[in-house]
Image (tube, rainbow, N blue to C red):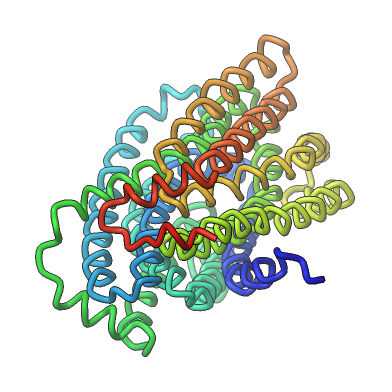
Amino acid sequence: MASPFATHYCETLRLGGPLVVAQLGQVLLGFADGAMIGAHDVHELAAASFCVGLFNLPLIFLLGFSYGLTPLFAQAHATGNASQLGGLLRSGIRINLAVSLGVLALMLGAYLLLPQMHQPTHLLPLIRPYYALMLASLPPVALFCTLRQLADALGRTSLSMHVTLGGNALNIILNALLIFGYCGFPEWGLFGAGVATLIARWLMALAMVAALRLQRPFRRVVASYRRAQSPHPSMPRRILRMGGFVGMQMGLETAMFSLAVIMVGWLGDTALAAHHIAVTLQTFGFMTYYGLGAAASVRISHAWARGHVRDARRAAAGSYHIILLFALLMAGSMYMLRHPLGGLFTDSPQVIDLAATLLLVGLAYQPLDGLQVAYANALRGIGQTAPLALISLLGYCLVGLPLAYLLGFVCQLGALGIWMAFLAGLGACGLGFYLRFAWTTSPQRALRLLHAEAGEPSSPGSSN
């Protein structure tokens, strides 16, 4: 007898495959950035680690904010409402760009406070120009993410994959030219890496705009976008609410890592460089899980919009089964390759040894990372974004961060103690997300929610 999850496995892999490839392309870009910058100068690698750690927070928040659009796009698509899709797209672009400018202003304030962050003083001249280039790249990231959510919600996940991979390839080529000064270009080192990233992000956003205007599957949506008048007052509020809570959830998770990088910086150059290597390598797992989870979120949104509660539950469970398999494969790979991979970034034995030690902790939390990704996306798919943010606040900020300081500095375990705290924070959130999804999608509770969702075309009797 065929497993009741068989269809969900196949559909999640079909939709999630391109998303995983695109996500891994991003990670490979980070890997290539780190390796190329480290080959140029180890101090530039430490400066890049600090900037990447700080900018992970606003970048993930912008990505999370755009993810709030996915269930809205997916539910409108599931019910065949092209005019609503056009209105959502118009409002989504405006709101996401406005949010990116607000985030830019906040990060500009952080730029002015760099001397107060107690980083090694010799790194500040390297950090400042790279940081400024990262600031300028925030608006195109917001535009690209918004358009990507539309394509993914309509099941066209290969579009964002192709644009992302093309942008990453361009970024790596520009890195080679501008970091090392090949082919007569200036040798700008870390500054050149920042210029390459800025150019690639703008071109990726413009490529998504062109693809949506030219490709047949999006013509109805683009036509509806052009006709869209002032949106109903509830639409911007709903986008802000959904996006704000999802962005908060992902931002809080990233905050645990981003604020931890400041603590790691207190331990010196070696710890900072090792932390950057370990974070870059374990991100391969996280991005794989998130690609699969994002695909499941689209499928859960479609099922929820139609009132098919059992299908929503099975889609969520099926996605975690697949993610868990990848998590175990990731943990085994990290264990076997932790020393050789560190050597791709630097030839410093102290940095390589510490990075390998941190990766031992990283492989232990892969299944827990997969759990929190699977059920965070499941909650997003059914529109339960407020509990998502609350659980994240408790797990990441009230468990993870205080424990990082306690283990790292009070217990004097250094960077190892900080990484051990990540294990507790991710585990607490994963369990919380799972329990909330199970409670919300219990039959009676789900029927009440489906009835209560104003404007949602639900069929409570069909919650199979």
Q: Which residue is drawn at the image coordinates 67% and 71% (left, top)?
A: 7
Q: Quadrant of residue 329?
A: bottom right
Residue 172 pos. (x, y %): 57, 68
Apparent side of residue 356 relative to residue 96 in the rendered image (left or right): right
Q: Which residue is drawn at the image coordinates 54% and 38% (left, top)?
A: 439
In the image, residue 343 sits, relative to residue 115, either above or below, namely below
Q: Nearer the viewer, residue 303 or 217?
A: 303
Q: Nearer the viewer, residue 325 or 187?
A: 325
Q: Quadrant of residue 48?
A: top right
Q: Could you tell me how many numbered marks the image carries?
A: 0
Residue 135 pos. (x, y %): 36, 49
Please identify the residue farthest to the front as the structure is shown: 461
Asked if residue 371 can be seen in this view, the reply is: yes
Asked if residue 126 can be seen in this view, the reply is: no
Q: Nearer the viewer, residue 148 or 32?
A: 148
Please identify the residue farthest to the left as the structure is shown: 230
Residue 124 pos. (x, y %): 47, 34
Apparent side of residue 389 relative to residue 27 in the rendered image (left or right): left
In the image, residue 151 sits, relative to residue 371, either above or below, namely below
Quadrant holding the N terminus: bottom right
Q: Which residue is drawn at the image coordinates 14% and 77% (left, top)?
A: 227
Q: Nearer the viewer, residue 412 or 397?
A: 397
